[in-house]
Image (spheres, grey):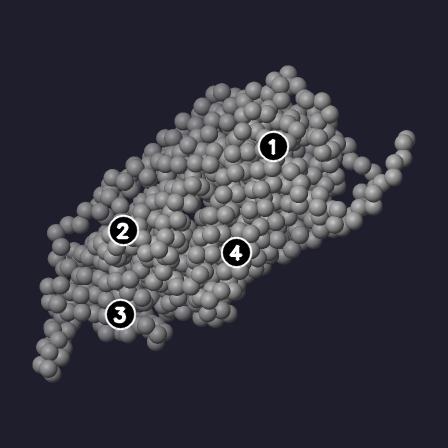
Amino acid sequence: METTTIEKKSIGNTIYNWAFSVDHKKIGIMYFVFSAIMACIGGYLAGIIRTQLWSPAGDLVSQEMFNQATTIHATIMIFFVVIPAFNGFGNFFVPLLIGARDMAFPRINSFAFWLAVPAAVLMIASFFVEGGAQAAGWTAYPPLSGSKYSAGPGVDMWIFSLHTIGLSSILGAVNYIVTILNMRAKGMTLMKMPLYVWTWLVTASMILIATPVLSAALTMLLTDRMFGTGFLLTDKGGDPLLYQHLFWFYSHPAVYIMVLPGFGAASQILASFSKKKIFGYHGMVYAIAGIGVIGYLVWAHHMFTSGMPAWLQVAFSALSMCIAVPTGVKIFSWIATIWGGTIRFTVAMKMSLGFVGMFVIGGFGGVVLANVPMDIQLHDSYFVVGHFHQVLSSAALLMIFASTYYWAPKMFGKFMSEKIGNLVFWLFFIGSNTTFLSQHVLGLLGMPRRIANYVARPEFKDLNQLATIGYFLMAIAGILFLYDLISTWMRKQETELSADPWEVNDIQETLEWTIPSPPPEYNFEKEPEIK
Amino acid sequence: MIRTVSIASSILLVVFIGVICYLTAQFGNGYDMPITNFIMNPVTDIAELARDNFWYTMLHMLPYFIISEGLLIYAIVKFKAGEGKVASKVHDNVLLETVWTIIPIISVTLIAWPTFDILDHINTAPKSDIEIEVKGQRFSFVYTYLEHDIVVADQTLIVPEGKNVTLNMTSVDVLHAWWVPSFGVKYDLVPGRTTQIWFNAKANKKREGTYTLPERNMKLGAHPDYEFYLGQCAELCGPNHADMMIQVQVLPQVEYDKWLAQKLKEKEEFASTF
């Protein structure tokens, strides 16, 4: 074997290689690390909320600070944790799964990632300016978020931060769509793509179409605040409801953006560890597309009590009910996938199974909320909080953990610890069900959301305390997960892993398990051909 | 060791769910509070319709819960990898896939169908017996009984039983929402427009025990023997959103007339001081 003089790798060299990389794999890992850091902040803010709500007259922080905490917790978790974390896996694996050398636009890919960093800095810095961070809820409805009631630069920084990360998202979406449509290996027709790639195609389409509408809403809010325009202010001839429609036109697809990649990962993982192909591939594709399309038609179910004519309530209610059908198809297909298989209970598998079990319950909450008389009772109550956390902590968070445990051997060339992973799963699963099922009940019992204390309603105390216990279980799970990540990274791998360390590719037949672990920079030695 | 953790964790999960159920069943006991939610204490026909619809919806979703969670757990137990086990190669079944698409469509239609009539009932205010103007402000609600020009600011809203009460609502500053769970009504208060809700409530005698509501924000100006219904602002409106309480009391017509007479007298006395 030839020996060459190897340049000693300095820290500077490593930083340069990563920071200026246009390699989708490095960018993917950077997105993932970025989201892990932001998750600590988002999780910390959740801790403030749950600790304050331990007792009816909780006064850990002032009401102003509490409102900032709820607002920024939500904003960070949505835009800076879930979406970037999935972007991490998407960036790493979509090109691999279709047999491509890289994304279609590697430099735009890098630019998009580096937009996320100043966006995050702005968001965090907003806590430290006069007036503090945005405190009108992540929904930021005017007039509360307008200049009269939220003076100070907090809201403006929040808007600029979201504009920036929104641009990052849109650029990423363009990359995914062009890559998937143009760079698939020979023989890989659309209906031969792994389901994970399908979920990214639909997710990216949703990001591309919906995010600019959010930008429009935020820009109107910004110009109303800074330049005296009157889009959203009644005394200037505008209408606060315009903001709500535009905001939710993005934010409803946003929730599907946050869960579809999780659905895709579940399809890959459940099939792999049952030694079966995914059940009903065609139905699954139509379900993903169906969710993508119907997801655009339901936004005003967030506004049933805001001021809309009755016929519109009926239309949005009926459409919202419809989403249950494709989602049901997916749940049944996942169960049918593991049915008759030989199940290996790896950590990733347990998490994916836990996701399916939890998502069913979250889905029921959605059906209840789609029905207008019910929604009138439950809108702006803890039922909604419980519902969206139930679906997100399963389809997003649990599946992010699962994707990490499943794909770590490929990304890092090392397995994560199954022992720690089991603790992470059980603590998180028990914690999240405890917290969010309690919150469903609290909503039914009449507790509103976004309240910093419940002094006048002490009867809510017991379930709130149970919810806080669940939070701490989740927090420990998160810390253990980070510990596992860091110790895996620091561990020395003596023998190199094979291309298919889980030994799933005889049935799975996806391309990421045909190349070394971790992959070389060029991914595939020869362009793969699919029969 | 992993097996022990799994078993212990399953037990722990069941325990937590059991505790949630227990706490729900115990809800309100020991706090001497009005039980204010549409499931346990509906006081208007709207709330009763909502409660019935809630259980109807739950009943319709129950088979799906049992089937999906049941099959999931069964599969986890039955299909564990082991010596000599071979995975099935079945990966589609057109009949099954058709059935599990069509049946949910039917279910969803059955669930949605009755809700539209209820919605129509909620949205169609009948001939109003009492019109009250509600102004939302940071951080209290101000009620004006239009017929008598009586203003009740941040105090108990008193209404007679069996009468159609219409609330015409607006905000003087930011978005608010008026929500009384027992009444089954909630709607936003929007600056620059008037939103309307209506209800027709029953009067119930107060439960045994004394309500000891906190001093802050709650001024009791009403009858001690009849139930109060608590509500709150349901749209984030700023730092003291949590303090923006609503309290409604429904009185039988006789008691309501007495209260009204008292209020009119107070108004006259006040006017005569000028």
Q: What element does badge 1 sit on?
A: loop
- Badge 2 local density, few (<14 within 10 Å), some, or many (20+)? some
Q: Which mark is residue A122?
A: 4
The reply, left or right, for residue B124 in relation to residue B64 is left
For residue A321, which quarter of the picture?
top left
Residue carrying label 1: A103
Q: Amino acid at mark 3?
A: Asp
Q: Amino acid at mark 2?
A: Gly
Q: Numbered disc 1: what chain? A: A
Q: Disc 3 or disc 2, which is closer to the eye?
A: 2
Residue carrying label 2: A238
- Badge 3 local density, few (<14 within 10 Å), some, or many (20+)? some
Indicate the position of residue B241 as horizontal and vertical percent values.
37, 64
Measure how far apart labels 4 and 3 are at the Cα level. 40 Å
Q: What element does badge 2 sit on?
A: loop
Q: Measuring 36% from the left and 30% from the top, which residue is drawn there?
A: B106
Q: Amino acid at mark 1?
A: Met
Q: Are marks 2 and 1 on the same chain?
A: yes
Q: What element does badge 3 sit on?
A: loop
Q: Measuring 67% from the left and 40% from the top, which residue is drawn there?
A: A21
Residue carrying label 3: B154
For residue B182, which quarter of the picture?
bottom left
Q: Disc 1 or disc 3, which is closer to the eye?
A: 1
Does residue B226 lie above or below A85 as drawn? below
